[in-house]
Amino acid sequence: MTVLVLVAAVLALLLGGAGAASAHAGLSGSDPADGSVLKTEPQHVTLTFTESVSFSDDSLRVLSPANERVNPRPAQHADGKENTARVELSGKLPQGTYTVAWRVVSADGHPISGAFVFSIGRPSETAAVVATDSPDDTAVGRLYGVLRHVAYSGLALLVGAATFVLVCWPTAGATRPVRRLLTVGWVALTASTVALLLLRGPYETAGSVTSAFDLGQLGRAVTTRSGGALMARLVLLAVIAVLLRRWARRFDGADDGARPPELGSRDRQVGALLAVALAVTWAFAEHAAAGIQVVLAMPVAVLHLLAMGVWLGGLITLLLLLRRRGPADQGVPASAIARFSRTAFRAVAVLVGTGVYQSWRQVGSWEALSSTSYGRTLVVKVAVVALVLWVASYSRRWTARLVHEASPAKAVRVRAAERARVAQTVGAPPAPARQDHDTAPDAPAGDGPDEKTAPPASDADTYRRGLRRMVTVEAVLGVVVLVITTVLTGTQPSRAAGEKAAAASVADSGVKVLTVPFDMGTANHQGTVQITLSPGRVGENTVEAVVFTADGGLASVPELRVTLTQEELGIGPLDAKLKNQKGYWAAYDLRLPMPGEWTVNVTIRTTDIDQVTVRETVRITPVPR
């Protein structure tokens, strides 16, 4: 039942956490710029990204106002720069609004997509319509996300169970639970890798699930960074299958408790080398392969992944062995539990150390922990890890008690106490000391009328039950950490989000500042109100208003109201709902739904009975893509 509950929890977490992923790269600029109006037709369209990208033949499409494609050839890197994509346009282009739709793959393997418009001569009333859904909000994208979870789980089971056998208890390799765990881990990792490779093409091009068997797409996927990593992983898994089969033959015939086969340093070295190679196939095609300090980030990512496998996979292995039903001599030796405790402690230490570095590299600032999706998810992971460490402290206590109970000194003391036990008769004079030549056997302990006949419960059994409970809780929390880690690998790092925002702000600062004069209600007193809209684009905006007197000093007014209206589309008036901030007025959640020319109406109450309304126009720009 415990195993079934664990499996159900894993499936629920996997399916629940398989949301859409955000990519690492971002569009930092384009030529022509989004929303620009050109006097003459351009010769090509160029996109610039925050990191290197790859693309297929259909990655960039330039559509005319009549929704006809006007770029006859596929995209190429501009001037050999890996972070650019350029397409040439066909001859004479009519006037109107053109749509540029793009979908590329960032260096960490995630597809990103978007669209923007530019006009030639003058904007037209019609433009091509392009879907703006998330690049992962497709059947292929969701299935790809679930398979990534399965791959991580398979790696953890395979590495953790193998480490337990090679380092902690060689005899465990002859037990049925460990053999099944190694098989399940290998099958899960192999099956998910094959499926990920088949889906790689449709995942990058937003194709259908049925196109997974398109040999053309499969051939192209194999040549990409992510596809090459998946192919290398399959080769390694084939080698591991041969090695596991050889080890299984060596363990065949060895029952639990029998002399284990020799597993020397060569076996450990081969196992460690294969585990490192498997982890490299992840680091080579995910966040570690892009961004800053790639040379250092790659080995750190490998260590982080291996430590996760050793700790979580080892926990599940130990849990299954502790829950076995069988003769007493089939239990896990206390020495093996102690060795795993030390190994798990080192693995968690590596997890924490490498996790701190990865967090600094991907987040970049304290503010990003609360302002980005990656940062908020990371905070949740840190909280769960802290809870895991707290539970693990109890596991170590139970392990220490179990090891102490099984120590040779403890056994000697117990045997000495048993030899010193003699039978006594309650209420009678003490029996004379027995002579050495006395051959009559002693009455067995417990035969007296007031002695309990049942032997006391074994402390070792109590300690094993306590350890089993703590390991169960630790394993479940470890699965939660694994799921959160998988979600993080599919989420845009905070540092990359900041770079994208900075690049966008360079292209378009966006902040709109309006200075509007108004009559203050007294002779020759003309005041001004300064309205600041930030970022001045579609979506949520901050509005700040400051009132100045005629001589430039700050003026205090009883009430200030700002509304915005889009007259052409009949939107508004939208009230900014300013609040007095003791010197200025502000609102932080004004949401503007559409770009274009907006009319700003400012109502200033100068006295309890006098007020004046002035107006100005402001251009709200689209959100940069």
Image: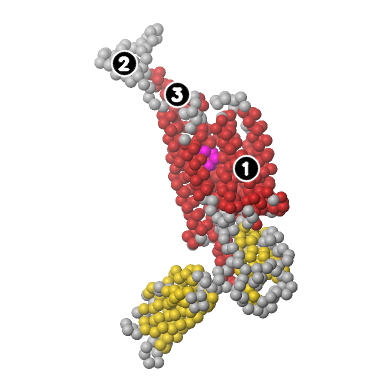
**Amino acid type, mark 1:** Ala
Which badge, 1 or 2, is on the more N-terminal residue?
Answer: 1
Q: Indicate left or right for 374 with 233 as reference.
A: left
**Amino acid type, mark 2:** Gly
Say which residue label 3 marks: 412
- Would you say the residues marked 2 and 3 are in contact, meaning their CB atoms lie under 8 Å apart? no
State whether the magenta stretch is mostly helix, strand or loop.
helix
**Amino acid type, mark 3:** Val
| Mark 3 and mark 1: Cα distance apart in space | 52 Å
Which x, y percent locates residue 341? 50, 38
Say which residue label 1 marks: 191
What segment carries the magenta color?
Answer: 311-316
Q: Indicate left or right for 415 with 194 as reference.
A: left
Residue nearest the viewer, comparing 604 with 341: 604
What residue is drawn where x is 43% and y is 84%?
614
Q: Indicate left or right for 85 with 500 as reference.
A: right
- Would you say the residues marked 3 and 1 are in contact, meaning their CB atoms lie under 8 Å apart? no
What residue is drawn where x is 49% and y is 32%?
322
